[in-house]
C-alpha cells in the first residue's frame, strides 16, 4: 500500500516535481533514525511514454490504468507549469489533463485525498472538488480561480489550506510547504521537522509577504492606478472615501472594481501597499522600526507590529532577520 501517489503531467514545473520526489526520498531515508515508518509512494501518468516536464526534462512513470478501491494514498499534483489564465484553459483541455481530472474525482469519491499546488489547483476545480471548500493557489492566479470557482472560498493569503480530503498550496515552490504539511499529517511532526532541517526548507504560513498588488490585479488598469495613488500618498495613506473621490468613483463602485480584480477589499489593498513599502524599507535600509512605521503611515511601531503579525505571522524584527538571511 502506498501513502502517496504523485501524478505527473506534461509540462509540469520540474522544480515542483523534483521537490516532491526529493522530499519523499529524504523522508524515506530519515524515518528509520526516528523509529518511524518510511513513507511509500508511486508515480503515475496519463501518457504511454515518459512525461516531459518544463525545460525538457523527462521522467518515467507508470500509466494510470484506474483507481483501486483499496487505494487510500494521497494523490499529489505538482504545479502544471503555466502562469496565465489563457494558457491554463488550453492546458486543462488537453487529453491527459481531462483524464487526470476524472481520476482525481473518482479517487475522492472512493474516500481518497488529493493535494495540489499552483496552477494544478485548477485541475482540482475541473474535477469538481473545490466547491464549498477553503482553498488557496498562486496569489496571482487567485482572481481567475475566483471567477471559475465562485462556490469555493479562495484564501490566497495562505500558503497551504486543508479542507476535508483536499489540500492546496500557493505558487510552484509552495510544493515544499505542501509536502511538509502532508508529511506532518501522515507521518508525524518529528519526521517532517527532521526532513525540513536536513533539506534546509521550512513551512511558511502565508503568501501575503510576496503579493505585488498590481500583479495581483492581472493588469487591471484601475487597480494599478489605485496602487500608485496609495504609494504616492505615503506616509499619509488615503482613506477609501478619499481614493474614491480622487478617482471620481463612488465607494461602492471602487469596492466592486477592486474585489473583481484582486479578491480583496479596498482597505485590504491599501494595507497591502503599505505592507509592501514596509517590507522594502526593512530589507533595504537601516531605519529603525519606529521610523519604518512612520514612513508607511503608522503612529508608532506597535501598530506596524500588529499589522505584520496578523498578515505575515512575524513582527518587523523577525522579518528583517529573515530577509537578511535570504
Image: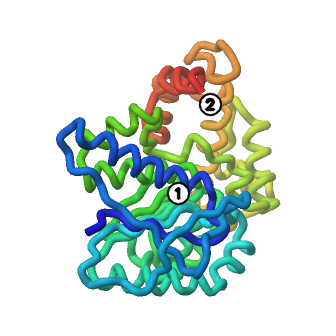
Q: Classify 47 as above or below 171.
A: below
For the question of whether residue 87 can be seen, the reply is: yes
Q: For residue 122, which quarter of the picture?
A: bottom right
Q: For residue 71, which quarter of the picture?
A: bottom left
Q: In x, y percent, where is residue 212? A: 68, 47
Ranked by sequence position, the earlier of labels 1 and 2 is 1
Left or right, 172 with reference to 56: left
Q: Which residue is mark 1?
A: 156
Q: In x, y percent, where is residue 257? A: 69, 66
Which residue corresponds to the image point at 40% horizontal and 51% vertical from the top-left?
A: 24
Q: Nearer the viewer, residue 192 or 30?
A: 30
Q: In x, y percent, where is residue 162? A: 36, 61
Which residue corresponds to the image point at 48% horizontal and 24% vertical from the top-left?
A: 318
Q: Which residue is mark 2?
A: 279
Badge 1: few (under 14), some or many (20 or more) residues near its Cα, within 10 Å? many
Q: Which mark is residue 75?
A: none
Q: Nearer the viewer, residue 137 or 184?
A: 184
Labelled pair 1, 2 in contact (Cβ < 8 Å): no
As drawn, the residue found furthest toward the left would be 35
For the question of whether residue 259 can be seen, the reply is: no
Which residue corresponds to the image point at 62% horizontal and 21% vertical from the top-left?
A: 292
Q: In x, y percent, where is residue 3? A: 30, 63
- The N terminus - image quarter: bottom left
Which residue corresponds to the image point at 61% horizontal and 66% vertical from the top-left?
A: 80
Q: Nearer the viewer, residue 302 or 30?
A: 30
In what element is the residue under mark 1? loop
Q: Nearer the viewer, residue 217 or 11?
A: 11
Left or right, 230 with reference to 39: right
Colour theme: rainbow
Badge 2: few (under 14), some or many (20 or more) residues near its Cα, within 10 Å? some
- The C terminus - image quarter: top right
Amino acid at each position: 500500500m502506498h501513502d502517496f501517489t504523485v501524478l505527473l503531467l506534461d509540462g509540469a514545473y520540474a522544480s515542483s516535481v523534483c521537490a516532491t520526489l526529493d522530499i519523499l526520498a529524504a523522508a524515506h531515508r530519515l524515518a528509520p533514525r526516528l523509529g518511524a515508518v518510511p513513507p511509500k509512494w508511486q508515480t503515475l501518468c496519463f501518457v504511454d511514454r515518459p512525461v516531459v516536464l518544463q525545460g525538457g526534462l523527462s521522467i518515467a512513470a507508470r500509466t494510470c490504468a484506474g483507481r483501486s478501491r483499496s487505494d487510500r494514498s494521497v494523490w499529489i499534483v505538482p504545479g502544471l507549469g503555466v502562469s496565465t489564465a489563457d494558457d491554463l484553459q488550453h492546458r486543462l483541455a488537453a487529453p491527459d489533463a481531462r483524464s487526470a481530472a476524472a481520476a482525481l474525482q473518482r479517487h475522492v469519491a472512493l474516500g481518497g485525498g488529493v493535494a495540489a499546488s499552483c496552477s494544478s489547483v485548477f485541475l482540482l476545480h475541473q474535477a469538481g472538488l473545490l466547491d464549498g471548500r477553503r482553498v488557496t493557489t498562486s496569489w496571482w492566479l487567485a482572481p481567475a480561480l475566483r471567477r471559475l470557482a465562485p462556490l469555493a472560498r479562495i484564501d490566497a493569503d495562505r500558503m497551504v489550506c486543508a479542507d476535508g480530503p483536499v489540500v492546496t498550496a500557493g505558487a510552484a515552490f509552495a510544493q515544499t510547504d505542501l509536502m511538509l504539511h502532508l508529511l506532518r499529517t501522515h507521518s508525524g511532526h518529528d519526521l517532517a521537522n527532521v526532513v525540513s532541517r536536513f533539506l534546509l526548507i521550512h513551512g511558511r504560513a502565508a503568501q501575503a509577504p510576496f503579493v505585488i498588488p498590481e500583479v495581483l490585479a492581472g493588469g487591471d488598469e484601475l487597480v494599478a492606478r489605485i496602487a500608485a495613488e496609495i504609494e504616492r500618498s505615503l506616509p499619509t495613506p488615503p482613506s477609501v472615501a478619499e481614493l474614491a473621490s480622487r478617482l471620481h468613483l463612488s465607494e461602492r463602485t471602487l469596492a466592486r472594481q477592486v474585489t473583481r480584480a484582486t479578491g480583496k477589499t479596498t482597505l485590504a489593498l491599501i494595507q497591502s501597499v503599505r505592507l509592501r513599502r514596509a517590507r522594502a524599507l526593512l530589507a533595504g535600509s537601516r531605519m529603525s522600526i519606529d521610523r519604518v512605521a512612520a514612513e508607511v503611515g503608522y503612529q508608532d511601531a506597535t501598530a506596524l507590529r500588529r499589522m505584520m503579525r496578523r498578515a505575515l505571522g512575524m513582527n518587523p524584527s523577525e522579518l528583517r532577520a529573515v530577509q537578511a538571511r535570504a
